[in-house]
Image (cartoon, rainbow, N blue to C red):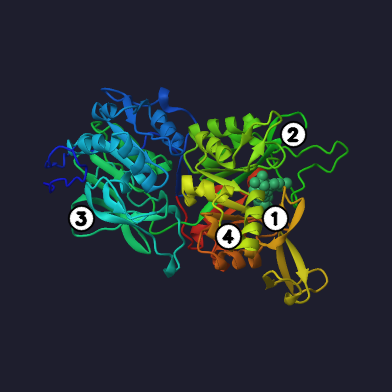
Amino acid sequence: MEAPPFSSSCSSSPSSSTARLLSSPSSSSLLFRRNSFSKIHYSAKFKSPRNLSIRASGDSVVTLLDYGAGNVRSVRNAIRYLGFDIKDVQTPEDILKADRLVFPGVGAFAAAMDVLNKNGMAEALCSYIEKDRPFLGICLGLQLLFESSEENGPVNGLGLIPGVVGRFDSSNGFRVPHIGWNALQIKNDSEILDDIGNRHVYFVHSYRAMPSDDNKEWISSTCNYGDNFIASIRRGNVHAVQFHPEKNVGLSILRRFLYPKSAMAKKPTEGKASKLAKRVIACLDVRANDKGDLVVTKGDQYDVREHTEENEVRNLGKPVELAGQYYIDGADEVSFLNITGFRDFPLGDLPMLQVLRYTSENVFVPLTVGGGIRDFTDANGRHYTSLEVASEYFRSGADKISIGSDAVYAAEEYLRTGVKTGKTSLEQISRVYGNQAVVVSIDPRRVYLKNPNDVEFKAVKLENPGPNGEEYAWYQCTVNGGREGRPIGAYELAKAVEELGAGEILLNCIDCDGQGKGFDIDLIKLISDAVSIPVIASSGAGAVEHFTEVFRKTNASAALAAGIFHRKEVPVQSVKEHLLKEGIEVRI
Ligand code: 1PR
């Protein structure tokens, strides 16, 4: 198939050329075997493949364009995991000389174009792509190929593909950002998508490019989320994907891109992905025990100490090992909460950063980390901004960060003054890394009421009355790990943090934490109906049925559990099997 000429907006780029779709031999199946249970298969093997993998026959170096705006550690890890070394682009010439170039765009469109234009990389990129050199753009790395974006714009892009990148429409009930595992509709044989078929791939974005007559020659797959948007493009050796090929089954895409000449057969695809899947998340509350070792702990209503004479911190295992196990078991995400971050400054708590680094080497699902994200001045008078703390978490392998106490203070201030200062941790981090990278973790406690008008905060009528027959409750937000109640309700907080730039809400409930009696449906319904960003239901899971209940009765996008997974009472696989059996779509 002959493709129409490139139309580049790069001012001094070489004249348009005609690219030809090259048909490379169909390649391989996934490199690594999967754990299996009944009919469900999960990508896994918690081990570096350097010793196992087939090395590329020629050069085994990948050139990576990282302009320093965010977390590309997971892409680096995935490339290394597949047996390749990385050469970082330092100058535009490095792009022109690359044998294969991976461009994982992160952050905001305008900021990325600014950097690319200022350092001459935009021109080099256009020239490289017009010469049909092997290229893989990821996420923003796909969007930047288009003419322009509405993100803080309009802002001109590289102009190689006709079309404007616009924001998802949340007015039709679809939550924005689009976060999670969704299905592809493969339009054209793209070769690198050969192993994907009916399986879910990971998306996390608020903006997307739309198909049109002008760009249809480029489209290799679309995804449906409210509308059909462009999930991947391909022309000749030029590929770009809106989703994340460094996550789970996506690794097969990276591998096919990196090993285009390998002669392995197309793998028959498994799975029945049809839409955005509900996510099952494993959460690891992490803190130092009394001996100073970093352990996974778990509270009952946030009390993490054993009720023994020694009163030790409950120790349920090692963070890196447990995270690896949950990945193998099929968890869709793993969250680490540094639960003493409010008093131990995380940049002084290097073991936590080390945990992230080790975990991200082998765990190819999104990692969220929270705890201690705030401004801080150390004993030597050195001031750290919350943005610096978050940046260190991102550099160490986090895909998303989660803010607890500091978001409560920010929301209180915003509700009091009605002014967005732009200076809160929430606003700063979401401005630099995008709101899809910022989760707000809420730790509310139920306060029972006889009359909903007794408080200025939003109260709900309870399914089950309180201990003294109270029919209502409001949910009081807390800070410092539940130690201090604040004058703000979960409802008011959720709406305020959405306006301030949060991309997702992790909704805990102190009353339900560790109780195993099910999620607080009243609370989750209240919050998931109040905001248009995704809500993760947390606290109280004790059986597989609790997951079905929360997805049936509320608009939660994900459900998180800790205790039942750590104590091996209910494995992640059983939760997913059950949800599938009940007709709730999950990633398989
Ligand atoms: O305030 O920005 O430093 O963030 C601190 C973070 O640490 C917050 O996200 C807060 O939720 C968390 N945190 C603080 N103290 C505790 C504690 O338990 N003492 N853990 C704590 C919160 C709650 C859940 C838990 C679910 C599921 N953990 O994340 O994993 O309730 O548990 P279950 O399935 O066993 O019921 P900052």
- Residue 462 percent coordinates (x, y): 70, 72
Specify the label residue 419 is tagged with.
4
- Residue 460 percent coordinates (x, y): 68, 72
User: Could you give the CA–CA distance between mark 1 and mark 3, rounded to whole angstroms?
Assistant: 50 Å
Q: Amino acid at mark 4?
A: Val
Q: Earlier in the sequence, mark 2 or mark 4?
A: 2
Q: Amino acid at mark 2?
A: Asn
Q: Residues within 10 Å of mark 3 (few under 14, many from 20)?
A: some
Query: Measured along the vertical axis of the image, is residue 244 above or below residue 58?
Result: below
Q: Amino acid at mark 1?
A: Gly
Queried on whether the Cβ of the residue with tag 4 lies below 8 angstroms from ligand 1, the answer reads: no
Q: Earlier in the sequence, mark 1 or mark 3?
A: 3
Task: Select label 4 or label 1 by which is in front.
Answer: 4
User: Could you give the CA–CA distance between mark 2 and mark 4, rounded to whole angstroms?
Assistant: 41 Å
User: Could you give the CA–CA distance between mark 3 and mark 4, rounded to whole angstroms?
Assistant: 44 Å
Specify the label residue 216 is tagged with.
3
Do residues under tags 1 and 3 come within 8 Å of each other at their CB atoms?
Answer: no
Queried on whether the Cβ of the residue with tag 1 lies below 8 angstroms from ligand 1, the answer reads: yes
Do residues under tags 2 and 1 come within 8 Å of each other at their CB atoms?
Answer: no
Residue visible at 16% across and 39% down in the picture: 22
User: Could you give the CA–CA distance between mark 3 and mark 2, rounded to whole angstroms?
Assistant: 57 Å
Q: Which residue is mark 2?
A: 289
Q: Earlier in the sequence, mark 3 or mark 4?
A: 3
Q: Which residue is mark 1?
A: 516
Do residues under tags 3 and 2 come within 8 Å of each other at their CB atoms?
Answer: no
